[in-house]
Amino acid sequence: MNLVLQGDEIRIESLDALRIACAASRVEPIGPHAWRLVEATPSSEVEALCFPAGIDWAWIPDGRRLADFGLFVSDMDSTLINIECIDEVADMYGMKSDVAAITEAAMRGEINFRESLARRVSLLAGLSEDALAVVYEQRLQLNPGAEALLATLRANGIRTILVSGGFTYFTDRLKARLGFDEAYANELEILNGRLTGRIVGPILDAEAKAAHLRTTRDRLGLGRDQVIAVGDGANDIPMLAAAGFGVAYRAKPIVHQVADCRIDHVGLDGILRLFA
């Protein structure tokens, strides 16, 4: 087993301490901000050494490479992008604090997602659809490393899917912008240029996210261990559990329990360095 370490500034003292704690045979540089501890033995000291030093860590089987995977599935809000779109849309209506409180509770797993989505969307009734464009064009930003990650996945022939409990207005545009092969989300009902406060069709919830992963995996003839998934909230847990390698990106504590690794400090392209 190898231990991959990533961080903006990893000090030599930290590397030495981790090498000793894991009885690693050697330390290999992966890139400017990443190192691999080869033939490391899992140790309870790793988190205690990494967390205060601002280091992301992941246990990776020796020889595991990006070419071993065939499918990548990503959440959108607060994972691929820096915002929760529904919160920012609500801000156009002066209701961000009300909607954001429900979003946060749902992300922590304290409220059923279907219930939370219905409550939040209902608060947007009457809002002009122009608010969606304002959020996309003025507030939405890609999280660090997103473009590099997607470009490299495409170059390696890995199928990419964007699945979101958010809205098709945003996933459709990000699909085109980043070259995702498929994108799925909830569709807001709009009549006469205004949001009605309702969703069109079935709600895409946590189980639907996982179902899209499994359906695509099976269609491609892949095994579970050939799938990477990344997310940040409780709504992503079934999807991460269904993947062979689940990544918790800037995630809520409840997500850490099911993910194979957590990324809290480096960008999304840190996923690539895990399998370099």
Image (tube, rainbow, N blue to C red):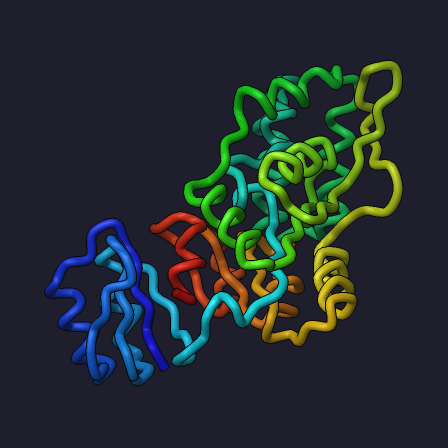
Quadrant (top left/top right/bottom left/bottom right) for the C terminus:
bottom left
Query: Is 179 or 105 nearer to us in this picture?
Result: 179
For the point 87% across and 14% down, which residue is it? Answer: 192
Percent coordinates x, y for residue 140 in the rendering: 54, 29
Q: Within the image, what quadrant is residue 70 found in?
A: bottom right
Q: Residue furthest left?
A: 13
Would residue 66 appear left or right of 168 to someone viewing this image? Answer: left
Q: Please, is residue 22 above or below residue 201 in the view? A: below
Picture coordinates of residue 153 (x, y %)?
54, 54
Vertical position of residue 264 compared to residue 133: above or below: below
Quarter location, residue 132: top right
Give percent across and percent down for residue 55.
28, 59
- In the image, residue 26 above or below residue 162: below
Judging depth in this view, the residue of 220 and 76 nearest the camera is 220
Residue 243 percent coordinates (x, y): 61, 68
Could you say which is closer to the camera, residue 133 or residue 69? 69
Q: Horizontal placement of 96 versus 190: left or right?
A: left
Say which quadrant the N terminus sits in.
bottom left
Q: Residue at x 53, y 24 (%)?
A: 139
Residue at screen point 30% across, 78% down:
44
Label count reads 0
**For this view, does 29 lie left or right of residue 81?**
left
> What residue is rendered at 59% in x and 49% in y?
107
> Is 99 situated left or right of 10 in this image?
right
